[in-house]
Amino acid sequence: MPPEYKLELVCPAGSLPALKVAVDCGADSVYIGFRDDTNARNFTGLNFDAANARAGVAYAHAKSAKVFLALNTYPQAHGWERWEKAIDQAADIGMDAIILADPGLMQYAMKTHPQLHLHLSVQGSATNYEAINFYHEHFGIRRAVLPRVLSFAQVEELAAGTPVELELFGFGGLCVMAEGRCSLSSYVTGESPNNCGVCSPPKAVRWQKTAKGLESRLNGVLIDRYADDENAGYPTLCKGRFEVEGETYYTMEEPTSLNTLELLPELLRIKVRGLKIEGRQRSPAYVGQVTRIWREAIDQCMKNPQGFSVKPAWTAELGKISEGQQHTLGAYHRPWK
Amino acid sequence: MKLALGPVLYYWTQEKLQKFYEGIAAAPVDIVYLGETVCSRRHIMRLSDWLEVAKMLAAAGKEVVLSTLTLIESESDLKTLRRIAENSNFAVEANDMGAVHRLAGRMPFIAGPYLNIYNPQTLHLVASLGARRWVMPVEMSHEALQPLQQSRPAGVETEVFSYGRLPLAFSSRCFTARFHNLPKDDCRFLCIDDPNGKTMRTREGKPFLVINGTQTQSALVYNLIGDLDSLRKAGVDVVRISPQSEHTAEIIRLFRDRLEQRISPENATQQMESMMPEAACNGYWHGRPGMEQMFLASAMQHE
């Protein structure tokens, strides 16, 4: 008999305290990364060493939660062994799955640790079922995390074409570009999500007060300039204001967060397996708040999908802690495109 | 080294494309990649039209390759992909793993620049599935390329994006439609008015990026004409030039002159200046931020 369908809440943790909070607040799974460039949130002071990862897995398993390890950058030849070692460690620690983007690594994982569950990372940039089935056939992936570029209708179409479980981003920072297909950051700074696990890295950021306003620069490139009454945001380069033919505006994307609470009944209808919260770089307090709200929302929706409605209090609380304090359905809602 | 012309990344009228490829038939280029790789809404050229161009170029002695869309999102995109993969006359450049899935074991293919081949293990894998050539990711340096070259499977050629505005990012959002305050579904195909894309400047007026529908490019023009000796030394087999609205055939000729040592790197670089829509950059090849320009003297020291 197939196991009963359940939508898993998949929460981020950049530290052991964040992992514990996520588990305590109702995460079904928590995803983490090691403390180096083997994952796409390679930030100073963030992430897990092997001992912390082991402690995290023990904590989660004791409370029936799972832990996934993100190894979702593309290794280059000179550092290859570091990624292999990370996979070996993941197997040794007893991770419930590893999240990979690089096909070469998938092959290594499959051959060396056949018991290890493989998830295809969003960085793998699989936006259609032929691509997902490729990874399924060759490496036996169990789950694929979809890039934040598909409309809901496209997700539904894709789901019908593959036996692989799907995980979708539900809340948090929003990449406007297809993940794994963006080199904007390395164009400006030399480091990108694919090759270094970072986007618009903090070490390239400079803030400067000028007569024209507060300026944010990335390796010298002016990303935005703020008047005194404007809130300054982190200079992620696709969220800056630039000028096109005399008009200055957010040319690529406003500083805004993805929030798909209202799509929950639809996600259940097409049996999406994982609902992913972005934000391994955020604090334990943030992880706790977001996890609690989404746990409540998912539970209510599972109980009564037809009668589900988004509580204004959820939206208000999530709004307070979001980037740019604005929400969007992103690409799931076709007019966003 | 062979010279290749990449697919036209912009949306041009049928007349412009027709004239362009007639010029290319007479230009000293060995390989021509054809097809729409950026946006599935662009419809001026149907597959049958591309196949006509392909036949004309093949008759002129070119190796013709059909390139697939990069961001394949819908069933109709997949339908187009299958038709390209199942054509029996021309090789195919796979720009998505879905395309690799359709081509693997069926016929030899070219692994395009968006497949994210960053290490020898992945290169061996795509070669085992039938890749006979691969295109290096644009952000890769000659140093990072080296280990892939050293352990390269027999019979697999390496191609490097060497000239043109860099295709840096793909989105499902159309930035041209966004500029015009139009939804993508009603974009009115206005990208046809920007045959070299639309320049995005910083708030202090510096050219930064270029909007090309759903694709974002560098405003600066990647130009490795001064680095061709270094490409040769790295064992690169194919040098890719990306089409631009004007001067493409002349640029191909300059690259050819440089490859055959008829002109110096300094002379070639100087002659290129008046033909580029913006200043040059070459940082990626030198392991630097892509937007940087390493000058010839320092490039030589680097070797």
Image (spheres, rainbow, N blue to C red):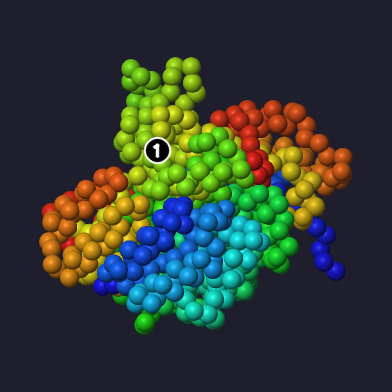
* Residue B120 visible, this angle: no
Query: In front: B303, or A176?
Result: A176
Task: Give the residue at x 72% y 40%.
Answer: A261
Which of the 4 image quarters holds residue B5? bottom left
* Residue A308 visible, this angle: yes
Task: Give the residue at x 77% y 35%.
Answer: A310
Where residue A8 sits in the image (x, y, percent)? 72, 52
- Establish if A103 lies above or below A168: below
Task: Give the residue at x 54% y 41%.
Answer: B177
Query: In front: A329, or A276?
Result: A329
User: Circle 1 sits on which residue?
Assistant: B200
Task: Give the residue at x 35% y 75%.
Answer: B60
Chain letter, disc 1 residue:
B
Helix, strand or loop at label 1? It is strand
Where residue B214 sits in the image (x, y, percent)? 51, 48
- Establish if B80 lies above or below A271: below
Amino acid type shown at disc 1: Met
Where residue A323 sits in the image (x, y, percent)? 56, 33
In the shown orientation, is residue A319 left or right of residue B203?
Answer: right
Query: In front: A247, or A82?
Result: A247
In the shown orientation, is residue B85 left or right of residue A96?
Answer: left
Is the residue marked by circle 1 packed among few (<14), some (14-19), or many (20+) residues within 10 Å? many
